[in-house]
């Protein structure tokens, strides 16, 4: 909700002693969008939302825990998201980015390979090849051939991607 009236309606619903689950989710998403991660993870119903079957909620929970430095909880939710929703581009992307930030490039590469081998290549998957190339270039002994192969595949999938050409 962007306007004050919507926020007031949401607040009124949340004041009710037994708000419906959609109100909980709306409140959590609002806090997430506002970057109020500490407030978000302290919600009494946050655990339920972040462990739901909805991949967006699980991802929101993982990102919130990551943002407040609760990395073990973030890791658990990222793994849960990958187990149940490994076919969702956004889940895989955020899992890979989390692994890279944590310095777990091997885990990131494994997730990239698993995703790319289990899905039909689409233009939007070019980012995964770009990430693969970047990781290959950051290895102790950079694998230039593997990086170039990944970049070429990225460009093949999405010839309009400026990043692919810049990497090449």
Image (spheres, grey):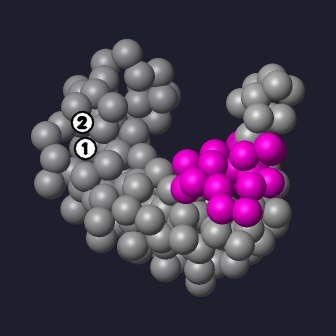
Q: Which residue is mark 1?
A: 149
Kindly check if marks 2 and 1 are in contact, taking CB atoms under 8 A apart as contact: yes
Q: Nearer the viewer, mark 2 or mark 1?
A: 2
Mark 1, residues whose alpha carbon is within 10 Å: few (<14), some, or many (≥20)?
A: some
Q: Camera-side residue: 146 or 115?
A: 115
User: Which residue is pictured at 49% across the width and 79% down the height?
Assistant: 76
Q: Camera-side residue: 136 or 7?
A: 7
Q: Which residue is mark 2?
A: 153
User: Which residue is pictured at 77% across the width and 71% down the height?
Assistant: 42
Does residue 36 show up magenta in the picture? no
Q: Secondary structure at mark 1?
A: helix
Hey, which quadrant is residue 105 in on the image? bottom left
Relative to residue 127, is residue 69 depicted above or below? below
Viewer can see residue 136 = no
Give the side of residue 75 with respect to residue 89, left or right.
right
Give the side of residue 46 with respect to residue 48, left or right.
right
Which quadrant is the N terminus positioned in? top right
Mark 2, residues whose alpha carbon is within 10 Å: few (<14), some, or many (≥20)?
A: some
Read off the magenta span.
Answer: 11-33
Q: Camera-side residue: 168 or 49?
A: 49
Viewer can see residue 13 = yes
């Amino acid at each position: 909700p962007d306007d004050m009236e919507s926020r007031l309606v949401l607040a009124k619903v949340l004041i009710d002693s037994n708000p419906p689950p959609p109100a909980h989710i709306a409140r959590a998403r609002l806090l997430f969008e506002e970057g109020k991660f500490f407030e978000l993870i302290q919600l009494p119903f946050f655990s339920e939302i972040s462990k739901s079957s909805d991949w967006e909620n699980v991802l929101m929970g993982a990102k919130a825990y990551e943002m407040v430095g609760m990395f073990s909880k973030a890791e658990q939710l990222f793994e849960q998201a990958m187990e149940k929703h490994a076919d969702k581009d956004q889940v895989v992307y955020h899992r890979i980015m989390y692994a890279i930030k944590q310095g777990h490039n091997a885990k990131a590469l494994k997730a990239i390979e698993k995703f790319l081998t289990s899905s039909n290549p689409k233009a939007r998957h070019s980012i995964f090849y770009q990430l693969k190339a970047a990781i290959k270039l950051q290895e102790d002994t950079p694998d230039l051939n593997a990086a170039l192969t990944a970049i070429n595949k990225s460009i093949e999938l999405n010839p309009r991607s400026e990043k692919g050409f810049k990497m090449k």
